[in-house]
Image (cartoon, rainbow, N blue to C red):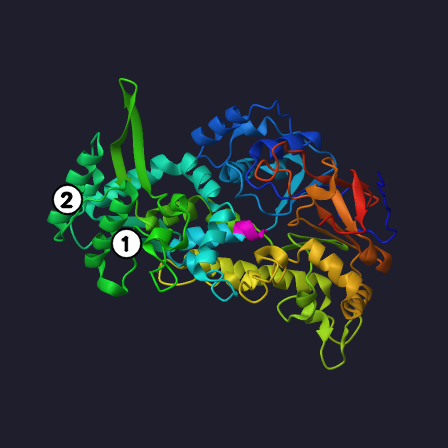
Amino acid sequence: MDQPTVTLPEHRSAYHRTIVIGDIHGDLDIMLQSLSEKKLLHYDGDVAGVIQVLKEGLTEDHLEDLETMVIRQEPRCQLVFLGDLVDRYHHGYHAVQFLKKVRWHRFGIDLIVLLGNHDLHNLQFFVNPYAAYQLYSESEHALEEVMDFIGRMGLPQSLDSFFDLHRDEIETVQRDFYRTGRLEWPLPYGSLVLSYQRDLSLLADYRGETLEDLWTYLKRAAEAFGFSWQPHINWMEGINAFTDRLALYEGGQTAWNWWDIAPRLSEELTENAFGGYDPKLRYFNIWRRDVERGGKPLPFVDVLLVDWRVISLVWRKHYGSFFRRMKVLHLDGNNLYAHGGISPQTMVDSQGFGALYSLSRGLFLKEADERRFGLKRTVQRCNRLARQVMDNALNDLSFTGMCGTEIIDAIGQWRGGRRGFTEFGGFLWADFEFLRTSVRGNQAIAQLYREFIDASGLRRVVCGHTRFQDHGDPELRYLRIRELYDMGLDYICVDNSCSRGYRMEPVRNGIEINADGEILGPGKDRVQSPW
């Protein structure tokens, strides 16, 4: 196997050692194994024990039991996660909690976490689940396809992880909200007050053992709320019909249905299609407690309808600050880290590296030229723009429309191509294979990159986002675009398919870059597509 180990004479970094971890996609165990392999952690494989520590310490700022796993680094090193911590597998938010609960800087480790498209997808959904169906609405795909895609991206697995950690808190908040009709939620700048227009205390204390018990309960509640109720054969459809009517007195047709996140039905959608949603996703907020009596399962001992606003508020409380700190780009010397790399579009887009490009002169300006903007300030500007958009989304508590985070991904403009949603990732998320093919087959794009490399002084781009386990070597850690390397830019992709979300037999993830710029780990030049 060809394993090029390349020293770039112009490589510059502030760190003696840089560890780069690709897309984890919810596999906490593989994340810990990968950090252990890189001598950053002591990990004995007891992922259940780590999860238990996380659950018991959710209210703590840091967890010393986790910090005993960390190996102190001298001199300081840099740990870069390339994004997509969540989705696909079962422990996405457990992995986020682990990164949150360790004070990495105290151990000589500077932690950098980049925002991936799955991370952004989760932020968009949890900030406003009622408008999630709008995310790809400008693409060429029908609404049913869009909603199917949202489910297939792995969001149900993220919800599993989130509820595993925070179910008790959500349940307590929701029951109190029903009983009092009022929810006052503390915010850094004041407080949010939510209220129900009528007494919903009946929804807080259901107990029953059969489907008939559930129908009797819902009929009694419907009569108390002033609308009729007819039993249904399927319990999910029945509860959906109940929450549809429940929303009517919550403000009429212009109000959101706080218990339902499906788009309003149109000619494209039918009841049988659940509005395009995976039923597991749509009904995640209907909680049942199953028990057994005499060996016979009793599925309706406890049913709680959870207002999606409560789910959103609890998510913001625990994860808002973490997502605010994520970057879309990280520049270290002349090394750039990005979730999906640099697309040809962002080379000339004014929100991206187009800040370095002169349309009137048709070329990239060097720092020595009259504008003196420079690569560093361009990257800072991209990160500031993304942070402002995420801040606005997290601070928007109206739940009345899309939050604006689609700006980061330019969703609807470059996604949804003929080869599928992920052919091209958007403003800053170029698919590695798409870029390689473009540079190889289009002289204009190749020339664009030559000019950018010459003007920017950039010497390496490290990205994730793209799967390449089909290459045939499960231990392969990164791929290189040879065409760009020959131009002077070492453009590499770290495998994002280590997770059980993609593999039956996952492999450890990540590469190490030493002080001389050498990449330690098996890699290959990408000379042809495996597809």
Please name the amino acid that badge 2 sits on.
Lys
Residue 219 marker:
2
In this view of the protein, can residue 262 be seen by the observer?
A: yes
Q: Earlier in the sequence, mark 2 or mark 1?
A: 1
Report how far apart the C-alphas of labels 2 and 1 lie in the structure. Answer: 30 Å
Name the residue at 66% across, 61% down: 379
Residue 75 falls in which quadrant of the image?
top right
Please name the amino acid that badge 1 sits on.
Val
Q: Which secondary structure is most common in the magenta stretch?
A: helix
Q: Residues within 10 Å of mark 2 (few under 14, many from 20)?
A: some
Residue 193 marker:
1
Quadrant in which the N terminus is drawn = top right
Vertical order, 194 against 5 (above or below): below
**Rendering coords of residue 131 (x, y %):** 40, 59
Closer to viewer: mark 2 or mark 1: 2
Q: Secondary structure at mark 1?
A: strand
Where does the magenta region start and end? 115-119
Name the residue at 18% across, 47% down: 200
Pick whichever, 523 or 527, lies toward us: 527
**Rendering coords of residue 279 (x, y %):** 38, 46
Q: Is residue 174 magenta?
A: no
Compared across the picture, whether 211 is left or right of 71 comes to left
**Rendering coords of residue 416 (x, y %):** 56, 61
In this view of the protein, can residue 456 be seen by the observer?
A: no
**Rendering coords of residue 176 (x, y %):** 24, 41
Q: Secondary structure at mark 2?
A: helix
Vertical order, 99 against 401 (above or below): above
Vertical order, 310 against 70 (above or below): below
